[in-house]
Amino acid sequence: MQNLTTLATLLPLAGALFAAVWVYLFAPRTILSYNANSNAAQIFTTGSVLVAAALSWVIFLTAPNGETHTWFTWIALSDWQITFGTVTDKLSSTMLIVVTTVSACVHVYSWGYMKEDGSRPRFFIYLSLFTFAMLMLVTAPNMVQMFLGWEGVGVCSYLLIGFWHHKATANAAAMKAFIVNRVADAAMLIGLFMLLQSFGSLTYADMFAQAPNTHAAGPENLSLALLLIFIGAMGKSAQFGLHTWLPDAMEGPTPVSALIHAATMVTAGVFLLCRLSPLYEYAPSVLHIVAWVGALTAIFAATVGLTQKDIKRVIAYSTCSQLGYMFFAIGVSAYPAAMFHLTTHAFFKALLFLGAGSVIHGMHHEQNLFKMGGIKKALPITYGLMWVGSLALAGIPPFAGFFSKDLVLESAFGAHTFQGTAIYVVGTIAALLTAIYSFRVIFRAFHGEAPHEDGHHHHTPHESPWSMLAPMVPLALGAVAAGFLLKNMGTLEWWQGAIVISEHHPALENAHHTPFLIKYLPLVLAAGGIAAAYYAFASKAGQGAMHRLAIRLRPLYLISYNKWYVDEIYDALIVKPTRILATAAYIVGDKLMIDHILVNGSARTVGAAAKRLRQIQSGKLETYTLLTILGLVLLLAFTIWSSL
Amino acid sequence: MLTLTILLAAILVILLYGAYTEDAKGTTLLTGLAALIAAVPLIMQPTTGALFQTDNGPLLLQTPLSNALWLITLLLTPAVLALGASNTKVTAKPEFSLLTLLSVAGALILITSHDFLSLYVGLELMSFPLYILASFQRDNARSSEAGLKYFILGALASGLFLYGVSLFYASTGSTNFSAALPLGTMPAAALTFMLVAFLFKLSSAPAHFWTPDVYAGAPTPALGIIATLPKLAVIAVLLRVLHLPLIGSLSLWQPVLLAAATLSMVWGSIAATTQTELKRLLAYSTIGNMSFMVLGLATGTPAAAAGTLFYVVTYILGTLGLLAIFRLLEDEQGTGPRNADGSEPARVTGHPSRVRGLPPQAESQLSTENLKGLLSRRPLLTVALAINLLSLAGIPPLAGFMAKLNVLMPAVNAGHIPFVLIALASSIVALYYSLNLIRHAVFSKPEKASETSQLPTLNVQLSTVVILTTVAALILGLFPGLLLTPLTILTTAFF
Amino acid sequence: MQEYFPILLFAAVGTFIAMVMLAIPMLVNPLRKTGTKLSTYECGFEEFDSPRKPFDVRFYLVAILFIVFDLEVAFLFPWAMALQDIPWYGFFSMMLFLIILTVGFVYEWKKGALEWE
């Protein structure tokens, strides 16, 4: 079993390496065309990920029981050591199927989507490498290996967002993603060191076993460490404050958005907090913060999603919002609910992204919703698939989102605290907004009429090739059925000890006894939201009304359209002062102090000394002899003097 | 014993074979085979104990540690030979590998010697072939110059050593390591004379002056042995000398070695910065690296000794790798043994005093110029060059870093913090010239477009050496325990 | 160390006398450099050649080879005298030594070190 996990984890790496060796070392020496070699690379990577996906399902279905398997010891110190290996439990196997399934679909999808791209092999190698890093993150038995995967994911994300490196905006977005994540990772690293300090180990099993003692020894210390880890998770999972990179990351190719920014990388933070649930249960104050950050993100992203014009940005903000749901579920200790929502969300969000990619492909790389319209006939299959995804996202039964989102909201209510209830209210409003913005996309893009004022749209929209539509089918099946089939995921027992909930936190238990009204209020609101969206965006009258509404509520509209001005505030508060400080430091500190005095000064000293030494090294034997004897005499003087 | 017997018998056989033939390849093959066969008893049935017992104690003493060092020496011998076997006109004589093997035999005797007399025999048996190898390219003025300088300064060191031994004998009445040197002025003088002689062999200050001239002049294949195995043997025997007969004078030799280490660190790193000739640069790098090992010896704890031995192994590997790369560059550029047009280098005749006055660039020597544009010409070789250079400079995660760490940590624990700080500062300077070489290889374009665009034919021996040392630098850097743990066990047992 | 004192005294006195005897002529002799005086003394003949001319390296080779086998004989004498006390061990030790020398001899012969031309 563990060997299967190892295999599944390493296969994508093998595929990527093999493809890299093939394309960049071997292929240039063959007579095969570049195209043929690119196809070979595509087959290697996709094949390895497909096999990994199959293995993952085998692992998932054969009921893993938390065995760990050690590959090797990396660093062995006297009092602690870092080993590499895998842990196969419910949590990691769930993440395994999510990651590999979506990754396999995205690989296949990219065959069609990236067909005309000149550097296809590079794209596929990055994709597989990313998959490997993500798998290492989720199967790691200790936080060091997890962190390596965590950073690997970050690097691959950087490479993939900036894949079209000739685009200045893509480069900027890639850098932004990397830097924002670095800020979060810095906090996370400090948290890791604090945990190491408190526990003397970063292996999950050791840490969990010692958690009661450590908590008794210093609850503040533990809480602070966990808060810092959470900040790291906020960065990866794009929570409010550190979310700014996610919408910009849509500059990357759409399959990347589907894989990284919907299903896998952004869920790493949620996964990590669930993985550390035995620790977080000892830090209720941190959980409060998690809950509020999650709720804030959920409502914030939902409001912003309402007004964005770029189809991918809408979906990106919806991702942000859904991640907020997961975090506030964690905040009320309903980790299973969070993981459940993570799983279902991965399917329907990847589906939505791939659908959006199909639309963009069909519209010849047009992403602006306002330049679309009435393409329902041209892209019937995409249209249907988008419906499935959006219904799942809005939480309409029997689609997957309904089960998981309801469980999340019920858990919040089930906490029976002021906070829980408040979060329930926020989440329910966000659910309404979710329904509106997700169907806004459908009605704007597929219904109505094509805008015909601009002449430079010569191309007629067309349906995507089968290689792009086929991989969306399994995702659509997941979006339809995953919620019902995996309903047990929402219970604590299902996780077989991989998740621990303290008995003082009964939110998840109480979720099953939610009053009828509370239980179905989100559903009613979502249905209403869809209806409202139909009126507002599909009917002529509604569109006019919306236009007037936007003018009347112009300040609100602007806040939403400009994403609450977070970027601008950061720019004014952090980026500009940092720039000024950096310029000052550059001129005074770097140029003058370091370059001129320290670096060049010491270099000049060394250079002058070297000139002297060179004169001594004249090549004259007699000089050498003399100097050797001189050294001998000096040493003799010392030794004889000290033994007198 | 069996190992030595096999080796000496092989030397006789190869000498006879070499008398009747000019077959350099066959001799090299035989020599390498002999070294490997000699290593077999060490693996299958290592023996320990005294050899050649005298009234005062044994002449040779085999210990687990000495057996391990023998094994390392013998296993590295084929790599050393591969440098010579890379088919140049210079070394295409049976004598080349024969002399190498003689030197190795001397090194083995040195490693096990337990008496100053056997030590001296081993030392000279090891050194004489090196003098010949340094001047192996007889029609080249720089090579002859290198051999002569090496020989004369080596003779000076031998004289100092013998004088030290005679003072030792006068103090103790024995030349065996089982005698303990008493305190007093004469023993102090004995110790100092001997140490300076050892420092000469290690090319550490204040007796390091020969190194740049010999390295620059000696043919590159000969450097493969001059710069590598003798260092290991001398370190090993010095460890014995310091901790057996001289242990009572620890308060004397420790400051002497620390002073020597500090001086060579500073000298080696600073003097290297202005060098453009690659082999001369390697000489200064050697001086700098040896100073770390001297520091490790001066620390005098089991951990430091293990670190020092680990260091010397990584140093040998790194140097071998660099030399193999230099050989490949020489073949490619036609420098070194041959001139750029493939002709023989100009013969220099006349009185030796005129030889000294030759301008150093009279012949085409490998310099940083030859590295320019290497990345575009031979990318993999550039990677190997960078890894070996950075390993020698001590960059993690390569072997050289672990070596420096394991020498400096015990020194810190022993309280030699000022010396460690100097060591760190000098290794930064050393990093400068290593990176400078990499800069030339990666970023600079050759000034004149190279007219020979076709890849040179694959040189199997040299490529193997380069690959092995590069991989070893990575493996020993990531998993230093593979070598360090056994060495620690052995040195702890020795102390 | 007491018993060595007379030797030290002897060495000191000897050095002193030698120095004095060298010093006296250097101080008192008249120095007139003439061509005849500076020329090399060759048993009454005119000098044929410059004495500073480098020797042929082959002379050194022969000399070195001679020394090796000369020393071999120097070893053989005491060995022969002591052979009664060290019967077989001593015999085979010397045989080994001689074999090694012989191999070296064969080598130099084959390499032409004994040929003058």
Image (cartoon, helix red, strand yellow):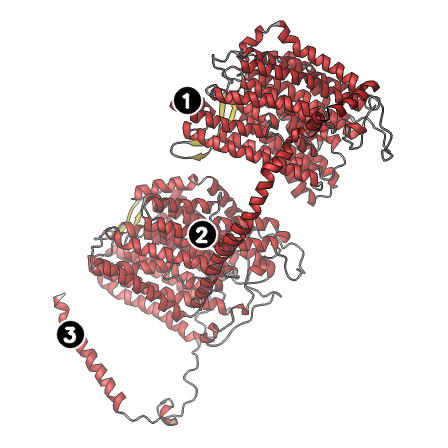
Secondary structure category for the residue under label 2: helix
Chain where mark 1 sits: A
Chain where mark 2 sits: B
Q: Residue at x 45, y 74 (%)?
A: B352
Taking depth in this image into account, of A428 and C17 the one nearest to the observer is A428
Secondary structure category for the residue under label 3: helix
- Mark 3 vs mark 2, CA separation in Å: 55 Å
- Mark 2 vs mark 1, CA separation in Å: 44 Å
Chain where mark 3 sits: C
**What residue did someone put label 1 on?**
A215
Does A339 appear above or below A316?
above
Q: Position of residue B223 (x, y in %)?
A: 47, 58
Q: Amino acid at mark 3?
A: Leu
Say which of marks 2 and 1 sits in front: 1
Residue A156 is at least partly visible in this image? no
Q: Residue at x 56, y 14 (%)?
A: A420
**What residue did someone put label 2 on?**
B427
Does B481 appear above or below C99?
above
Discs 3, 2: same chain: no
Q: Quadrant of residue A350?
A: top right
Does B213 appear above or below B62?
below
Q: Which image quadrant: the C terminus of chain B? A: top left
Q: Residue at x 78, y 19 (%)?
A: A536
Does B383 appear above or below C19?
above
Q: Furthest-front residue in view?
A: A552
